[in-house]
Image (cartoon, rainbow, N blue to C red):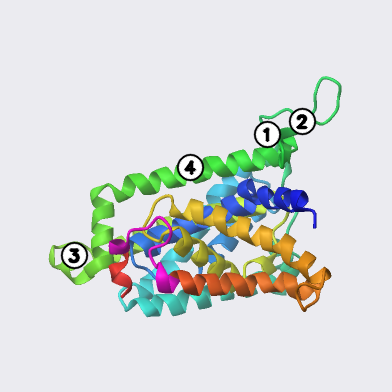
Amino acid sequence: MDWGQIFNNTAYWVFSPETIAYALAATGLAVQFGFGGLLNFGMAGFMALGAYGYAISILTFGWPWWVGIIVGCAAAVVFALILGIPTLRLRADYLAIVTIAAAEIVRLLLTTQLFDAFTNSADGLGGYHAGFRGANPFPKTGADGEPIIYGFGPWQWTSDQLWVRVFGIILLAIAVYLVWAIMRSPWGRVLKGIREDEDAVRSLGKNVFSYKMQALMIGGVFGALGGVVFALPSAVVPATYTTSLTFFIWTILLLGGAATVFGPVVGSVIFWVIMGFLDNVLPVLAQADILPMTGQQAATLRFILVGVALMLIVIFRPQGIFGNKRELTFVK
């Protein structure tokens, strides 16, 4: 077993676009659930709208890449309005049912022939990278004409790969700062009050529905930005945006701490490092006959282990690694 190669492959996930994208989406879910108490099980839908809004804006309408990001965020806001208007005045479980169904409806609509001219149905979209890569500030080749490789050790990237990561980290840093700022503001204190007892907040004359809607939209925008970052390196494929993506984001949120600012970031790094490590180790153990299964079965075993870990977190540390247990009294 080549442990050096395994650790190198595992270290890749610390700064991977997937890790950054999921951290952005989990930050949005922290606003909705961790601070607002909104049970959103449709984050995959927000990420899909962000990714497709970005790609379609470029491929179909020829708009600049930065306009595509704005379009993806606007689509997430509209989606939040569609979900929130009929459900946010009802119990939280109704929102959970609606969001998980709505996200699946979005994914199925993206695979139909009805919108094939825009979405390319189940085949997805690609070839929209020219504008973003054209804005890359990092030189691609040196004076000798050879491609420049940035980084060190297991973290070595081409110019375009580095640009995706730097841009994603910038978006994530902005998102984390905004969450930190708004949760320290009067708006954030009202939102946390709604999470604990919305009737008490309503008795003080606050429009609870309006605050919930704003939290749903803000979290949805962060989810859409996560979808954009997720789509930057390669392509947009509808099969990616299944319910399992939403459950991964929930795992990340609960792992880092639902009612924390930095918890989603730390949770995403830990989650993907563990997933990467298991993806490298388990098939090797199966090939060495240490595990009584095939390599393909061993690769699937990591999802079972993550599921068990999620159950243990919910049972023994529901506040997450960095969370405060008092912040989650509303879950009981």
Position in image of residue 230 (x %, y %): 63, 54
User: Is the residue under label 2 in contact with that under label 1 (CB below 8 Å)?
Assistant: yes
Sequence order check, earlier mark of 3 and 2: 2
Residue type of the residue flagged with mark 2: Lys
Position in image of residue 278 (x %, y %): 68, 63
Against 206, residue 91 (above or below) is below
Which quadrant is home to the C terminus?
Answer: bottom left
Residue type of the residue flagged with mark 1: Asn
Against 60, residue 242 (above or below) is below
Q: Nearer the viewer, mark 3 or mark 4?
A: 4
User: Is the residue under label 3 in contact with that under label 1 (CB below 8 Å)?
Assistant: no
Against 36, residue 291 (above or below) is below
Query: Residue at position x 56%, y 60% from top?
Result: 47
Query: Residue at position x 62%, y 75% from top?
Result: 304
Q: Label 1: how many residues lie within 10 Å, few (<14), some (14-19) or many (20+)? A: some
Q: Nearer the viewer, mark 1 or mark 4?
A: 4
Q: Give the residue number, with chain letter if any, for mark 1.
A: 136
In the rendered image, residue 167 lying in the magenta stretch gets the answer: no
Residue type of the residue flagged with mark 3: Val
Q: Give the residue number, with chain letter if any, for mark 4.
A: 173
Please identify the quarter of the rendering in which residue 331 is found: bottom left
Classify mark 2: helix, strand or loop: loop
Against 87, residue 324 (above or below) is above
Residue 192 appears left or right of 121: left
Classify mark 4: helix, strand or loop: helix
Task: Give the residue furthest to the front.
Answer: 290
Classify mark 1: helix, strand or loop: loop
User: How many numbered circles are shown?
Assistant: 4
Name the disc covering residue 140, or none: 2
Please identify the quarter of the rendering in which residue 139 is found: top right
